[in-house]
Image (tube, coloured by chain):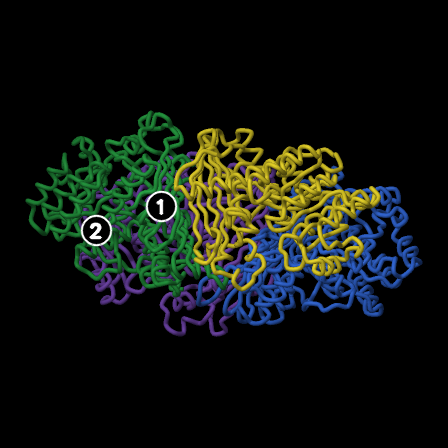
Chain colours: A purple, B blue, C yellow, D green
């Protein structure tokens, strides 16, 4: 066991970031801010925190931002920041708006020459996603998508193990993401998080499917290295007045012959943020649960279960590089999220990166296609190629 | 916490049992014998332990049975035992043969006036199952099916909680039964347990589906009180030479509007006997895992998770009646199994029984129909009413 | 993973046992009866179940014993059984009385030529214990002491690992046995289990110390192979009217230079039967908890934690020999207890035994000396050699 | 379940901090920096990061500090910062040096008018600690001691529950802090963390006792509200060449009649950072483990165990105020640490504070006295009043 906290660079070298969205009442904006600040490699210097200029101004004040760099709209921010001297202006935007508001500012930011780190799902249609993917390619800019669960060290450990053949040929993949907070129609009471997530105009066609199902889908492919090739979905709204699914189940087939299932539900009462992944191969298996992120169980066909934890010498290099503390000092959700920002900043700075440092626009395109395919399959009640 | 072991009656009052199957090399026969002996309410006095008379004789000797009551065939046993004086002859048969050998001896035993306790699945076709159900009705005899997992106290606790509205309206049901022991084609090496389970002539059309999937299905309905009304199945043989599925997944709809999924797999490497059940309702949820059978997690919409364990004063009467030891003294698989034998013996003796004392022939019929429906759905790749 | 239940011999070869104590209202008598019956290698055929002849008769009837072999006193049983033909009479006695009633019947039984299996602690003074040890030696009979926790397979696995150097040189030993059932003075309400356990005339000088502390002490030495050489104890009665300790803590030094601690408490509210053992050496460590007996955690200085479970091919021979079921089919307290009876029966029959098949009279002597030494140390508030 | 991340103020209002110690190779310095940055309420603006001016300079550069505010000694920093305009100069120092280097800079900082946040244990003698306590009183400045484990929300939840009588009268307190990283003499190889911790000149008289035992001691009193009144200690160096204990055990008596034990060891191979606390009262109990900090188990005499987790509506106000994320989004060691910095900053700013917002110099004095008392007790092998 090492007992040194990994040193963190920062300060004057920090990547200057402008945030789009994340004003008062938002959830994920605050997360992004804590994540970007953690290692000192990014610095929040500007923001268009709300589509309501007054709220943006108020949010900026709460955050202690320079008032001259708190903007009433993201269009203003992009335009005026671009006009600042190069050593002052933002270098990247962080987009933390509801799903329908990812595409436009991302396109504009790329065109204005800024790097982009964007929340998921990428967009609300695959056509928009593909357009954005094309724009990223043409821009040459860094684009990261915050499927933050890939930032957990033990997910990286699992990925390396599985992809290097450590559990043999992958045969079964079970992924679940269960929450309970939408079991009642709290959107009717104006709960802000619930409101946009259950409004197809802002969330896109998927409810639970888009909000958490895409995380599950991305994680399953990320860790296993296998790609879904065929699927059958079923969607349901347990709250009758809800316009999107609050529960989705999908049977999965993978290109290599593996099969599995995905469940994404927001009506599983008492479940908090129960994302879990299990993969079984011909020689072993792995199991991981987001609520205990520092534990990776590894099954062996001919031996006892192994229980790996970060910060130990036996952990692989990629996971080790995403760990700040010695073994037994739990890191959590924010640290995992911060690992994406750290890698994003290093990418912007052209520094050396670990393998697959963060999810990309291609993950985003695939995620939106997954939503659409599950929606279609559920409507048709039939297996569809993917 | 009470600290008294529940006293057990037995001895001369014990129900006299003849076993069919369970000779040398069998797994479940030994389990039945330990289970029936545990509380002294049943006594093994005769056996037709193998279709090979020599093996039956040898098995009887190992068990210390009276050689005159070890028979070369179950037909002989039924005939000769029926000829013994009433106070000597067996009162019931315990059928622990492979699946295809349940129907004939069960029919004959009922017709000969014996009670029957039989392993699952009931038969290999629903036509045979229905015929047997009819025979049970006409006979007036006790018939118990050893879906043994219903014998765990915490399963009973969950059942009472859920059925009495303790988690509100049931919305989601997830049941899984994962093993890994068939990931390799061990049937090719003559492993006895694997051989008959992967031979459709002996196991019926379902492999993992019949062997463990029926347990999962029965448990889900037993605890939730809801009935599957529609399903979509997918079956796979990961071992290419295997004639039955070693992996089955099913999406489920229930009559009350709930939905869920069932997974039954014997190729999940490193999984031992991982049967788990989770049910979520509008007000709470429950979670239970067979490998830690003495723990029932209960989720509440507005409160902290509760963790119930047997032997405590707060546990309901049915669960308490299935518990032998004070809290903290773990009971396991055999004790759960023995609870079915205890209730079976009490039923034979006409004593007072708890609610739903053991699974019945009706559970058996439903289980076989479930196998057939999943097979059909998987072939047609479509949802089917059930 | 094997999937065969271990076959069990029994029937006519079973060791015939007469029980002393264990009448209506007793706890441990029922446990012994279920344990001895489990594998068919012992058979309860006689009993002096209470010092009250009427209660003994009633108990015998409930158990279905032959009324002619239910005795009004253990003296009668020993005398009259000895007069029966050799092939009928009991071969061994099972002593399940309160602690003060172990010595006399054990002495008499040995002298009458019977084998003995006796509950713990052995006696209420070390002088009596030593006298009994001498009697065992002279008799040549089998004597087993039911420190039942040594019957758990994972305890045997830990023992083999630690004693064979698998964790290096042993340095730290922590053992705890925490219960909460005596937090209130339930003995004042006549609760039978509490009454004798808190009465020094029947329990001996140790309360929690004798009742559960001796289990903890014996387990620590059994698994580690190290012997306590010096100790400092502290005893307390949290219930002011209680005549014995309901809480004891002991600091321990071992002959090899290791150190550790023992806690035995019956006032830890909400703790059920929380016996746990942790041992750390120069190269690794082990941790085990009685309430999850099928899991042995093994720590490695240079590798991930291992999690061993019974029924798997990687488990050592001794543990495997104490396992009846395939992996994932939990065995519990009764099965562990039954392992002692199985080994006891095999010893009586002169069959081959595993290493250290059951705790012996020597363990019993050591346990009583431990009680006395802790009592003395607590009184003197000083370290004492042991 | 709320699903909003708590908004964090910061920016221009942030408390300006100068760090003493924490240069290249340090562990706890990096932790302090991440913790202070997390909520934007503190900002690192200056540093005397090493007693070696060149290393200080290099460390400052890595951190992106203004070179003019990176000092070659803490004396320089205090002097020169004091000379800066009030709105620029540091407001507080964060002292993260080895134990023997806490007292002098803390005294000087207070005298120079700076607030202080300091690592633990406070000093290496109680005389120095008392002097410092006096200086704090006279200065009127804020002084926080980073017993960081008090920053975990579930520790605060436990504290409120226990102190408000939720488990009845406290009777038993078990606290443990087990690590394994010093099982080998890694200090001989120059491992920096090991070197100073095993050098009495820098660590003080306690090895494991001072480094982690004081955390355990402070946590036990903090949560229980009871004060140790008498103790018996035992110290050992398993590594023979080591000048301080690497293993300490203490029996504890508390002023209210409770008793308990404390174990602090750094030779428990395979243990990472296993700090755990269990408290039992007449009506219930609590259990908490640092490696799973988001779970608080609560035992009830007459009901099932409860399992509380942060972010839920049922959690008390203090714990809620120390939680940034919705339920199920794990926060860890850094977030707990950051809670102390957040409260420290609020105290500096004169804002409203939760009850017991951070450990104080009084905790520090008590901790150093505890070290000295355990050392004395271990030497004398006797109980000592405390």
Q: Position of residue C62 (x, y in %)?
A: 73, 60
Task: Please report the residue visible at 63 percent of the width from the left and 56 percent of the height from the top.
Answer: C26
Task: Please report the residue visible at 51 percent of the width from the left and 32 percent of the height from the top.
Answer: C226
Q: Find residue B384 and report its image quarter.
A: bottom right
Instruction: Report helix, strand or loop for mark 2.
Output: strand
Q: How many marks?
A: 2
Q: Position of residue D271 (x, y in %)?
A: 43, 39
Q: Residues within 10 Å of mark 2 (few under 14, many from 20)?
A: many
Q: Which residue matches tag 2?
A: D42
Task: Please report the residue visible at 13 percent of the width from the left and 40 percent of the height from the top.
Answer: D69
Task: For the N terminus of chain C, give its image quadrant.
Answer: top right
Q: Vertical placement of C48 versus A55: above or below? A: above
Is the same chain shared between marks 2 and 1? Answer: no
> In the rendered image, is residue D27 in sight?
yes
The answer to whether residue A334 is left or right of residue B364 is: left
Q: Which mark is residue B124?
A: none
Q: Which residue matches tag 1?
A: A339
Q: Nearer the viewer, residue D254 or C37?
A: D254
Q: Nearer the viewer, residue D51 or B57?
A: B57
The answer to whether residue B105 is left or right of residue B346 is: right
Q: Nearer the viewer, residue A197 or A117?
A: A197
């Amino acid at each position: 066991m090492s007992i040194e906290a990994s040193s963190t660079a920062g300060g004057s070298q920090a990547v200057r970031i402008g945030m789009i969205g994340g004003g008062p009442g938002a959830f994920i904006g605050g997360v992004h801010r804590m994540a970007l600040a953690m290692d000192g490699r990014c610095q929040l210097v500007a923001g268009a925190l709300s589509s309501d200029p007054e709220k943006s101004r108020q949010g900026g004040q709460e955050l202690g931002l320079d008032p001259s760099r708190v903007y009433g709209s993201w269009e203003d921010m992009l335009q005026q920041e671009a006009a600042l001297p190069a050593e002052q202006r933002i270098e990247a935007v962080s987009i933390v708006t509801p799903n329908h508001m990812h595409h436009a500012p991302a396109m504009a930011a790329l065109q204005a020459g800024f790097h982009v780190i964007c929340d998921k799902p990428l967009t609300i249609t695959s056509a928009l996603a593909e357009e954005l993917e094309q724009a990223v390619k043409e821009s040459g800019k860094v684009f990261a998508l915050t499927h933050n669960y890939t930032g957990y060290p033990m997910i990286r450990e699992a990925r390396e193990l599985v992809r290097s053949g450590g559990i043999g040929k992958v045969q079964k993949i079970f992924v679940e993401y269960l929450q309970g907070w939408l079991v009642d129609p709290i959107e009717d009471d104006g709960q802000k998080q619930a409101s946009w997530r259950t409004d197809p105009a802002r969330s896109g066609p998927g409810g639970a499917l888009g909000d958490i199902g895409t995380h599950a889908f991305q994680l399953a492919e990320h860790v296993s290295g296998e790609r879904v090739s065929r699927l059958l979905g079923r969607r349901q709204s347990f709250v009758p007045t809800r316009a999107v699914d609050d529960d989705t189940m999908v049977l999965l087939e993978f290109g290599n012959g593996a099969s599995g299932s995905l469940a994404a539900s927001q009506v599983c009462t008492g479940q908090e943020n129960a994302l879990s992944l299990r993969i079984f191969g011909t020689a072993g298996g792995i199991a991981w649960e987001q609520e205990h992120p520092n534990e990776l169980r590894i099954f062996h066909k001919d031996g006892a279960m192994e229980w790996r934890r970060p910060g130990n010498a036996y952990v692989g290099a990629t996971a080790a590089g995403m760990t700040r503390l010695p073994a037994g000092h739990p890191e959590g959700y924010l640290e995992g999220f911060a690992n994406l920002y750290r890698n994003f900043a290093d990418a912007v700075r052209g520094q050396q990166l670990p393998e697959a440092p963060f999810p990309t626009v291609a993950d985003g395109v695939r995620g939106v296609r997954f939503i659409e395919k599950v929606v279609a399959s559920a409507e048709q009640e039939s297996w569809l190629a993917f």
